[in-house]
Image (cartoon, rainbow, N blue to C red):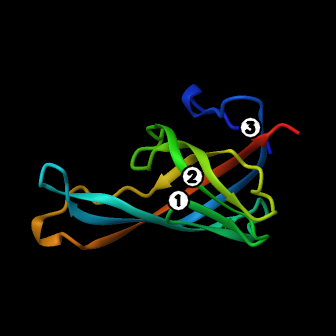
Amino acid sequence: MGIPEVPENLKPPGDEELVMSVRATGFQIYICQAGADGKPAWNLKMPLAELFDEKGVAIGSHYGGPTWKLQDGSEITGKMAARTDAPEKGAIPWLLVSVASNAGKGALASVNWIQRINTQGGLPPASCSEAEIGKEDKSSYSADYYFYAPRA
């Protein structure tokens, strides 16, 4: 498990070490809503994905919050700290996420930072209309999540 090559703004600060990586497959769920300007637009409601270890075994889930929860009982929620456009056309951005809360005693207990990279798909439809306000849309996506904790 090597540290991935990412743009400078997506590198975790400080003396953090990579402690885990997972593959996520699932959906980005969007809702058509009136924006601040009154025009309808797709807004992210939540992700809904399964998390898989390096052998392809399901080990947890990723859902609204955003939250990552493993079967070992550990759970974290995060807040976006930085983003950059994905190199792959039609893919959701790559992110650096700071952990806002940790729960449980498993693998995620000491995690402070998460990277979302190698994204595929997940973008909302191009536009929504007045008639679609309140409608949800599921967009299939996959991504790699890298978890960082303070160096022991």
Q: Residues within 10 Å of mark 3 (few under 14, many from 20)?
A: few
For this view, does 47 lie left or right of residue 144? Answer: left
In which quadrant is the C terminus drawn? top right
Pointer 1 or 2: first along the chain: 1
Q: CA distance from mark 1 to mark 3?
A: 23 Å
Query: Do the numbered discs 3 and 2 sit on residues whose CB atoms are within 8 Å?
Result: no
- Mark sitting earlier along the chain (1/3): 3
The N terminus lies in which quarter of the figure?
Answer: top right
Q: Which residue is mark 3?
A: 3
Q: Secondary structure at mark 2?
A: strand
Residue 6: quadrant of the picture: top right
Q: Nearer the viewer, mark 1 or mark 3?
A: 1
Q: Using the image, determine if residue 79 lies above or below residue 73.
A: above
| Residue 59, picture quadrant | bottom right
Which one is in front, 120 or 114? 114
Viewer-nearest residue: 119 or 89 = 119
Q: Type of residue at label 2?
A: Gly
Q: Earlier in the sequence, mark 3 or mark 2?
A: 3
The disc labelled 3 sits on which kind of residue? Ile
Residue 10 x/y as whole percent: 58, 34
Q: Which element type, helix, strand or loop, lies under badge 1?
A: loop
The one nearer the camera, 53 or 44, is: 44
**Measuring 68% from the left and 69% from the top, which residue is drawn there?**
60
| Tag 2 residue | 78
Task: Examine the rendered structure and indicate whether residue 13 appears above or below residue 112.
Answer: above
* SS at mark 3 in the image: loop
Q: Residue at x 58, y 62 (%)?
A: 67
Spatial separation of the CA atoms under disc 1 and disc 2: 6 Å
In percent of the image, x 81 and y 63: which residue is there?
105
Label 1 sits on residue: 66
Q: Residue furthest top?
A: 8
Residue contact at pointers 1 and 2, CB within 8 angstroms: yes
